[in-house]
Amino acid sequence: MPIALTFSTGKAEDFFSEYLLDVEPRTDLQPFPGHFLKWGRLGDLYRTLGGRPHSFLLAGEVVVVIVFLQALAAAVVLLLIPAVVMAKKSGTDRRVSSAYFGGIGAGYIFAELLFIYTGTLFFGDPVVSLTVALTALLVSSGAGGLWAQRHGPSSLAPALLAAAATLLVTGLSLWYFSQPLLALPEYWRYAVLSTAVMIPGFAMGVPFPLGMRFLMRRPEDRAFAWAANGCASILASIAAAQVAVSGGLHWILAAALIGYGLAGWGLLKANRTMAEQHVRGSHCGK
């Protein structure tokens, strides 16, 4: 027999919005049942718990935030020290490489976890979803990297745009057609998700090798770019869990697009810097 919630006064929406914890029923875009904290009500919750801050450690969301802050502090130290040292020697601005390679690193990881979470909805098993989504993404990204070897710096901006556009279309399509897809036989769901992942995966495999070839001229520049990309990937993998739990899958998609937008800003700055250097070189030649 189904059980229904009854309220003495008001509506269900009023109860969920005013309650101290987030007990609203889960949806396909926000499917995580272990989420209870309301970040805007932490002060009220703190007073309700008797002013004991250690009680917050029982909440998984708080633990994720603590781990993220620790990783962020480590990343800042590991990137800031070599950036300062290298800037004194060469005068190179590391903000460009940090923005470009950090942006594509974060965008890639957010997209990867988005497909894994979405695949869990289709397969009902996170292990199967991880296997299918990760395999399709790595294979297609490798193919994109091979394709990038035959193209020049003019492909950098189109590659970033293609990665963001295909990711947006794929994410929205999977959610919009989720009900018909769930009605398909299991092997068709494997095929659909694999194909859907490979389309943006191919585009997302292009910006990194192109950037390494045409934006980073010296070995130390490439080493720093690798470090920025790796740190951003780690931070994004931690943040994605909190974003998914607190905001939902659509916010992971938004975070991935912001990452590629940051990479686009870094590319614009790099192009402007190289153009200024070319102009200065021309004047010196005269």
Image (cartoon, rainbow, N blue to C red):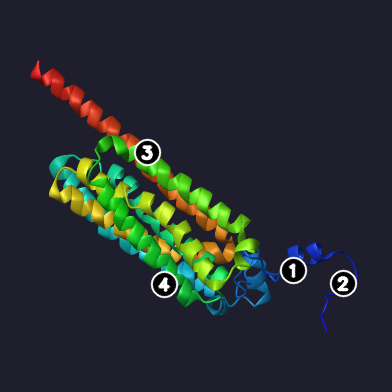
Where does the image place residue 274, in percent across and percent down from the top left? Answer: 23, 31
Q: Amino acid at mark 1?
A: Tyr
**Residue at 83 percent of width and 76 percent of height:** 4
Q: Amino acid at mark 2?
A: Phe
Residue mark closest to the camera, 2 vs 1 = 2
Q: CA distance from mark 2 to mark 1?
A: 13 Å
Where does the image place residue 131, in percent across and percent down from the top left? Answer: 41, 72
Answer left or right for 19 relative to 267: right
Q: CA distance from mark 2 to mark 3?
A: 54 Å
- Residue pointed to by mark 4: 131
Which of the two discs, 3 and 4, labels the residue nearer the N terminus?
A: 4
The residue carrying pointer 3 sits among few (fewer than 14), some (14 to 19) or many (20 or more) residues within 10 Å by Cα, namely some
Residue mark closest to the camera, 3 vs 1 = 3
The residue carrying pointer 4 sits among few (fewer than 14), some (14 to 19) or many (20 or more) residues within 10 Å by Cα, namely few
Residue with the most extreme bottom position: 1
**Residue at 58 percent of width and 61 percent of height:** 248
- Residue pointed to by mark 3: 158
Answer left or right for 279 relative to 190: left
Q: Quadrant of the C terminus?
A: top left
Q: Identify the image quadrant of residue 111.
A: bottom left
Which of the two discs, 2 and 1, labels the residue nearer the N terminus?
A: 2
Answer left or right for 199 relative to 14: left
Q: Is residue 68 in view from this perspective? A: no
- Residue pointed to by mark 2: 7
Where does the image place residue 262, in percent across and percent down from the top left? Answer: 40, 44
Residue mark closest to the camera, 1 vs 4 = 4
